[in-house]
Image (cartoon, helix red, strand yellow):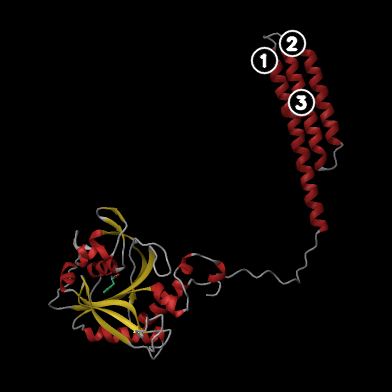
Amino acid sequence: MVTQMKERLEQIEKEASEALAAVVAAKDLEAIRLRFLGRKGELTAVLRGMLSLSPEERPAAGLLVNEARGRVEGLFAKVESVLAAKALEERIASETLDITLPGLRPAIGRRHPITLATDAISEVFLGMGYEIAEGPDIELDRFNFEMLNIPKGHPARDVQDSFFIDDNIVLRTHTSPVQVRAMLTRELPIRIICPGRTFRIDELDATHSPVFYQIEGLVVDVGVTMGDLIGTLKIFAESVFGKDTQIRLRPHHFQFTEPSAEVDVTCWECGGKGCRVCKFEGFVELLGAGMVNPKVLSMCGVDPDVYSGFAFGLGIERVALCKYNISSLRLLYENDIRFLQQG
Ligand code: PHE
């Protein structure tokens, strides 16, 4: 019985090799594959025939069938690679390449309006000798709040609704912790701006976003005064919004500055005459600022009897919206390519 099977296998191998030798195109292979290797093919039929063998004969017979299958598969692979090489050669011979055609221009990305605004603001301060300082988005409560004179449980925390990771770790609610880090590590005098991403719990609408960008600034030196702060902010406002821009300070309260002010600039829409953008005020609120609280200086290892400093902070989106005449904050985050391509 096994001898018979062996003969049958040899015959199948011979037939397969003859059939393959006659193949000229890859599309003809499939039918032959089905005939010999398919589930209803010749080799499977031989395998089925094993049922009539005695249990002792079966292992040797099974081995024979598998070996034969391996050899037939090898034949197929060989023919396939020859056909593939032939097809490639034919394609190369038939295709022509016109090297005089102009190429496709690669699409070049644009800078995002937030990046544009960040760069425009940074430019002004770099020109005044400031350095750029950066810090982590995920911050210690100590640097984000406590060392800025906002202890745990203090009501001043309420205005900065925060994403806490645990009791001591928070997504920074402003870039002020970069200033704390700078005072702890840098040599004095310090003159830095801190651009970066910040996080507060807020619904996304035309003027709010849970993720937004800030630039804060810090100067610490001997004899720094409120006059220096006002002069600096005036230069900044004129450079970013135009020569005729006025600034206006209103008394305010921040835990980390004393005295503190909110700073408005001439409305960019109406130039100060009064319109809907400025709610007929002629001015639009842009910054928080003040003289660094002596308590903050000493917590950060700076002697307030020798040094003084000013700090300010502003939202970059606000600047981007007005500078580039964008109607809603949402547009900055939707990533609509038609909007971004205008940059
Ligand atoms: N850190 C303040 C905020 O995000 C802004 C600010 C910075 C105010 C520096 C005063 C001085 O609300």
Which of the two discs, 3 and 2, labels the residue nearer the N terminus? 3
Q: Nearer the viewer, residue 199 or 122?
A: 199
Which residue is located at x 47 percent, y 74 percent? 327
Residue annotated with mark 1 = 59
Q: Dot 1 surroundings within 10 Å: few (below 14), some, or many (20 or more)?
A: few
Q: Quadrant of residue 26?
A: top right
Q: What SS does tag 2 mark?
A: helix
Dot 3 surroundings within 10 Å: few (below 14), some, or many (20 or more)? few
Residue 40: image tag = 3
Residue type at mark 3: give it. Answer: Lys
Give the SS element for disc 1: helix
- Whichever of labels 3 and 1 marks the residue nearer the N terminus, that label is 3
Query: At which x and y percent is residue 55?
Result: 67, 9
Mark 2 neighbour density, 10 Å: few (under 14) some (14–19) many (20 or more): few
Vertical arrangement, residue 274 with respect to residue 32, above or below:
below
In the image, which disc is placed on residue 52?
A: 2
Q: Is residue 59 left or right of residue 122?
A: right
Say which amino acid is labelled 1.
Pro
Question: Does the image show residue 189?
Answer: no
Q: Marks 1 and 2, Cα distance to the nearest angstrom?
A: 13 Å
Q: Is residue 175 left or right of residue 44?
A: left
Please, what is the three-letter code of the amino acid marked with disc 2? Answer: Ser
Residue 52 drawn at (x, y percent):
74, 11
Q: Nearer the viewer, mark 3 or mark 2?
A: 3
Q: Residue 311 placed where, x, y %?
A: 26, 76
Q: Does 229 sit above or below residue 132? A: below
Name the quadrant containing residue 236: bottom left
Q: Tell me the quadrant of ligand 1.
A: bottom left
| Marks 1 and 2, the one that precedes in the sequence | 2
Number of the front mark, 1 or 2: 2
CA–CA distance between discs 3 and 1? 22 Å
Quarter of the image where the N terminus is located: top right
